[in-house]
């Protein structure tokens, strides 16, 4: 019983770690997109 509970805890930790890593990766991508948009906007203003 205790062994099973420990297995479930470890599985849950792995799941949470995966979700956290996916969230961090998503934040990085969003940040890069915002930066690209800001750079494009700056270039557009310069051209005009």
Image (spheres, rainbow, N blue to C red):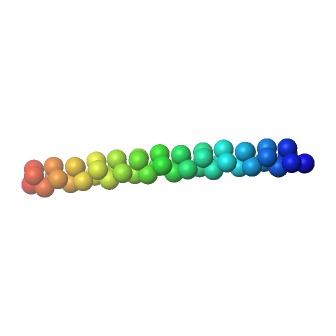
Q: Position of residue 33 (x, y in %)?
A: 34, 49
Q: Please name whichever residue, 20 or 42, is drawn nearer the observer in this view of the structure.
A: 20
In this rendering, would 18 be left or right of 38?
A: right
Which of the 4 quarters of the picture holds residue 11? top right
Q: Please name whichever residue, 4 or 23, is drawn nearer the observer in this view of the structure.
A: 4
- Residue drawn where x is 41% and y is 47% of the image: 28
- Residue drawn where x is 34% and y is 47% of the image: 32
Q: Please name whichever residue, 3 or 32, is drawn nearer the observer in this view of the structure.
A: 3
Quadrant housing the C terminus: bottom left
- Residue drawn where x is 21% and y is 54% of the image: 41
Q: Position of residue 31 (x, y in %)?
A: 36, 51
The number of discs equals 0
Specify the farthest residue to the front.
Answer: 2
In this rendering, would 27 be left or right of 36?
A: right
Q: Position of residue 20 (x, y in %)?
A: 55, 50
In this rendering, would 42 be left or right of 29?
A: left
Q: Is residue 45 above or below residue 29?
A: below
């Amino acid at each position: 019983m205790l062994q099973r509970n420990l297995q479930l805890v470890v599985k849950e930790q792995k799941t949470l770690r995966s979700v956290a890593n996916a969230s961090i990766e998503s934040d990085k991508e969003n940040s890069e997109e915002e930066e690209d948009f800001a750079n494009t906007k700056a270039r557009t203003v310069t051209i005009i």
